[in-house]
Image (cartoon, coloured by chain):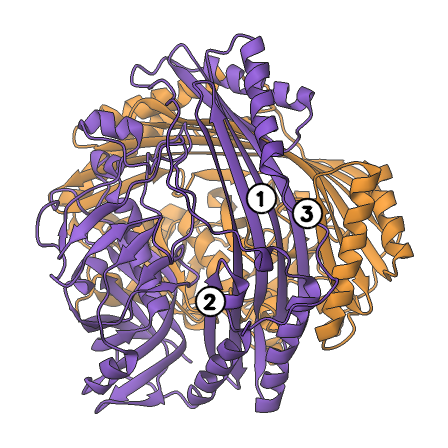
Chain colours: A orange, B purple
Amino acid sequence: MYDLATAALDTAKIRGAAYADVRVMHLRQRDLTTKNGQVGTLAQAESIGLGIRVLANGAWGFASTDRLTRDGVTACAAEAVSIAKASALAKRDDVVMAPEEAYVDSWQSPFRKDPFEIPLETQLALLLAADGEMRRVKGVTLTETDMQFRKIDSWFASSIGSRIHQSKVITGCGIVATSFQGDEIQKRSYPNSFGGQHALQGYELVESLDLLKHAPVIAEEAVALHSAAQCPQKTGTLILGGSQLGLQIHESVGHPIELDRVLGQEANFAGTSFLTLDKLNTLRYASDIVNVVADARLEHGQGLGTFAYDDEGVPAQCTDIIKAGQFRGYLSNRETAHLVGLKRSSGTMRTESWNRLPIIRMTNVSLLPGTWSFDDLLADTDDGILMETNRSWSIDDRRYQFQFSTEIGWEIKGGKRGKMLKNPSYSGITTEFWNSCDAICNREHWTLWGTPNCGKGQPMQTMGTGHGASPSRFRNVRIGAAFSKQ
Amino acid sequence: MSAIRKSKGSIPDEQLMAEGELRRIVDTVLRLAKSIGVAETEVHVDETISALTRFANNGIHQNVAEHTLNVSVRTQVDQRTARATTNRTDEDSLRAAIEASLSLAHSQPKNPNLLPMPGKQRYRGVSRFIKQTATLTPEDRARAVRRACDLAVKKGQTAAGIFSSAQTQTAMGNSRGLVAAYRDTHAVFSITMQEGSAASWAKENAANVSDINPQRLAERASDKAHRATDAQELVPGRYTVILEPAAVLDLVGFLFYDFAATALRDKRSCFNERMGKQVFGKNISIVDDVYHPLQFGAPFDGEGMPRQEVLLVDRGVPKNLVYSRASAKAAKQKPTGHGFMLPNEYGEAPMNLVFSGGKFSLEEMIGSTERGLLVTRLWYIREVDAYEKIMTGMTRDGLFLVEKGRVGPAVRNFRFNQSILEMLRNVEMMGPAVRATGEEAFEMVVPAMKVRDFHFSEVTKF
């Protein structure tokens, strides 16, 4: 693969590129789903190709090809240079990148069981058994299960001399029970909604989830929600479960710290950010107990944002984002790092596939564990609402005002879990919300959640991101606005 | 006169393969599958050549091109089916894809409801491949972007956006003699103009790039961005709104899957228990029509069935659903040509919605409004309640107060929590249906709408 990459780099240089990097990628994916006791999707896909990014006349060009021959990749490199020269017709300033070393390395993500080696019959039998457990519950009207496995091999080469091979195995799995009754559709998912849990792991992730134990529980909850009380509308105390807090971090911390958004590069589509450059080291983002990092290193965990090098050849790093409540850092690449005067990229350039340009993406943006046990947190809460498992999420294009709803809630009264609540929702302003955090559960309750479906960029790219979180408590939160009538 | 100035002698090297070449790949797969005894085989070959120029801060910052070709093989044996896809077209890779599909298929229990593949079909012709779009060059796009950015600089504003062009084709066939092919082109220009903390936006797409006038869109966004400065804060509540077509599109776009027969069967459609009832106002009629001159898409579905025009909503009453072959058989109906590629759990969906619209101009809607809000577009829309179809989201890029029939000052953006069912009961006026494009839904033909009692629940800081 490096021969092809080198041929592309050589062509780019001859055609006038001052810098070039190449990614040859081989992606394999398997998708299994069931619905109402029958197999739904059963498919696998494979794709291999090369993408080259070049800097010529001070501007960027990118082209990709699936013709992996010497002629194919040299033509692709020549096209990328032509595109860069066209970009220069409407450039603002010459692109300059923060310095970076050259690396020659090879890395394999750790896994215990290769999901592509587990018999399909075994995988389908587990999904159909979980599906059956859910359908056994009276009142359930729709059952769905899914597994997704990916293997991604990438060979990165750059004109500064890097040659990096990375191989990743990714697994995802989840189950859902839905109940239609009267004028309501209620749903419960395990271990998370929108595809379940996803991680940089092998089949051991599926085995750790114990689907058969949880299937009847969520099915019964889906049916019970019909007779649960409506979540009240009020301002009060909110406890968020870990997976919901993971998405809260994704939307209200992860996206606003992307430096391309901050610098206006995403203004037309994803939006900008309230975290303008003057906020760095001056904004009290959150309360004193809140510490958030962007950590792509393996020691943080096997998340969807874990790797050894980003797709610009920069080593994985841990960056402080919020430290003791203060805003401390952005997600950057080599270009934006230079633009804002950083010495080095924070290593967050990632691409969906060989035919997409790497862009700044979240890695594992995680809330570090606090000190509370979950039981103590409940016991310490006199009057509040516990919300779990996301149902909807929305935030404005500068990442100030958000609203989330969850599948299920529980009233907390006098330190104890009380009655079930349906249609829970909460909303607020990002910094007000994070400054109201007064308790974070400890590492025992901390999970590195995977968000497999983060969309960004034009053309759109879908990327997996990781978000470590444990249940946490927030005060004076607006609750229930999603169902208000006035 | 063409809105895009074409460069001479700068035709891109990349062009789609001849249809015959795609057909040869289909035939090769069918031959290989037959040689190893596969009972039934279906092949899709999809090719895309696309390029996208992205600009921000008044200059190009990303500029990309891609050429992809995927071969997707579905085998069916003994009441079992599965799919495997590859982007390699040599015989070894195609054979490997067939074998992978077979291996997947054999791993599952029999599905007694699985239908044999359909035989040869007849299709209505549609012509949506425009050479001028297919030959747009990076220099053509850069020059149009340069003019838009120059306007921004002249006005003291900052421009960001995209200018893209694409050509795609698909060929499919199966072992029962079905053969289908389609190709089209697609161009998009989208621009956001920022002035201080204010912003506005304009976007168009078309099969023919000459139907897009980037500079006119830049001027529209620039003018609205200027008027959007100094936004005042209003109290959340229920307002009469005038929704421009992009705002209508991104909301009603969330209705499409509810018209799938499979969604009703699974009891996850908002039309469960509501078919044949007066769900919307009598001024709302919706058809699904791939042949409409403002629509895009192939005249056949994922199984190769011809797409039919379907009247979904007649004067406010949901009348008909769309069907794949399987859902049609289960419901004792005829397939409408809306099925997804098999195997899948979702069945089918209408992908070419066309609203009937009305006769009023945007100016007439504004002129008739004592107090309301003019909405340019909506953003980050998500479903809060699946049965009442309550959606949440934000206004974005230009929200203006309308008072005594005139557009007044800009207003800070609101969050809405609004049932689409209720909204389509409260439509007071509509414009002619146009091909709209937003960011949340696929393109449809929808009108601007004046809607009473639209529910805004909270306000943001800009």
Place of residue B154 in the rendered image (x, y in percent of width and height, measured from the top left): 61, 90
Answer yes or no: are tags 1 and 2 on the same subunit: no
Name the residue located 57 percent from the left edge and 50 percent from the top edge.
B167
- Left or right for B294, reference A340: left
Query: Label 2: chain?
Result: B
Residue that mark 3 sits on: A297
A247 or B292: nearer the viewer: B292
- Using the image, tell me which numbered label, if any, was put on residue B204: 2
Marks 1 and 2, Cα distance to the nearest angstrom? 35 Å
- Left or right for B254, reference A167: left
User: Does residue A20 appear anywhere in the picture?
Assistant: yes
Place of residue B203 in the rendered image (x, y in percent of width and height, measured from the top left): 47, 69
Query: Label 1: chain?
Result: A
Identity, as a three-letter code, of the amino acid under mark 3: Arg
Identity, as a three-letter code, of the amino acid under mark 2: Glu
Name the residue located 67 percent from the left edge and 70 percent from the top edge.
B142
Marks 3 and 2, Cα distance to the nearest angstrom? 42 Å
B71 or A17: nearer the viewer: B71
- Left or right for B407, reference A441: left
User: Contact, CB < 8 Å: mark 3 with mark 2?
Assistant: no
Answer yes or no: are tags 3 and 2 on the same subunit: no
- Left or right for B229, reference A79: left
Q: Nearer the viewer, mark 1 or mark 2?
A: 2
B203 or A393: nearer the viewer: B203
Residue that mark 1 sits on: A304
Place of residue B153 in the rendered image (x, y in percent of width and height, measured from the top left): 62, 86
